[in-house]
Image (cartoon, rainbow, N blue to C red):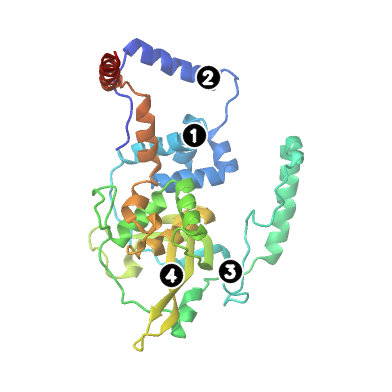
Amino acid sequence: MGYVAVKGGTKAIEASMERLTYERLKEQEIIEVETIMATMKSLIDQVMSESSLYSPFLAALAIKQAEGSMEEAVFLLRAHRSTLPRLYTSETVEPETMFVERRISASFKDIPGGQLLGATKDYTHRLLDFNLLEEDKTQITTWLKNFENNLEQTEGKVTYFPKVVDYLREEGLFETYPLNDTAPIDITKESLSFPASRSARLQVLTRGQTGAVTALGYASLRGYGQVHPTVGEVRVGRLPIHTAHPVEGSGNPEDDFYIGEIRVTEIESFVPITKKNGRNEEKLEFEIGYGICYGQNETKAIAMSILDQCLDHPEGDFPTHDEEFVLLHIDSVEATGFISHLKLPHYVTFQSKLDSVRQIKRGVSDDES
């Protein structure tokens, strides 16, 4: 819905906008878009994910314009996205082709291909580093040179890592499903309806506000659904994107055009469930919850995988299993817009309510007298 202010005194609005520019510039400090791209990668990843637009440069520009406000930056980028022509549709992306930068499993100590910690804050001490106040370009250049020299000595060939779940499927521990080539629903071009298809659900979840998706995933873990998965695999890396030949179309993958790559986080969570067999005996099985989003945003992707599995079971009694409750309340633009619209004039409706209250109180006073 995205409520925005559309009416008001022209002079007052123009003065407000000038004041906004003044507040941004009054300290006479300017942050370059390139600086935001280089130093605020996590923020950029979140804005791109919630905007459904993979462009670090435009995300950084939106962050600068929004002065660091996540909600405003996402609003700006979604608005810009709506103006862009859609010239091509990419071919289906195969996660197995990911150039992996980070890959871990909480389910197994030893996995085929090994664990790859990559870049993560998981093992850092959460203490303020006051040395950052003294950083300068000379120190940075020296550190980078030493690191890159060591990196060149240890780098090997590019390796494509197998999926952990594939080995479990080979053992018959996970169900195997036939390939589904049904075209996904694009919720940016079609209104979301219920019950929603899984493709629509996954789109809403990956576009969802990071804090909201995390909060609902956490709620399910705490007991509102009691879904407690084990992360089978976390993957962070770059996926190649291809489009079909504009004339001949798709058919032979070798004829597809490579147009670039996107950095993503992909999660497969293993959720234990109980089912009854033919003898009415309860047995333990596993289902998979899936999460994927732009950039490196592992917490959101894990929470997304939890909610994906929850929404596969609408018979659950908890709100985290209600797709209408979940999907309609995690959208940052919708939520921010609806809350913010309360700042707009409501003079007529409020005065009407005041008049009603006055009449009731006047009637009560008359009855008491």
Q: Position of residue 91 (x, y in %)?
A: 33, 62
Earlier-in-chain disc, 1 versus 2: 2
Against 139, is 319 above or below? below
| SS type, badge 1 | loop
Which residue extends farthest front? Answer: 369
Three-letter amino acid code at disc 3?
Ala
How far, Cα to Cα, is label 3 from label 4? 14 Å
Against 356, is 285 above or below? below
In front here: 289 or 356? 356
How far, Cα to Cα, is label 4 from label 1? 34 Å
Evaluate whether residue 26 shows in this view. yes
| SS type, badge 3 | loop
**Viewed as shown, does residue 93 lie left or right of 113?**
left
Where residue 106 is drawn, which disc sits there? 3
Where residue 288 is drawn, which disc sits there? 4
Three-letter amino acid code at disc 4?
Ile
In front here: 254 or 359? 359
Residue to which mark 1 is pinned? 69
Which is more foreground, mark 2 or mark 3? 3
Earlier-in-chain disc, 3 versus 4: 3
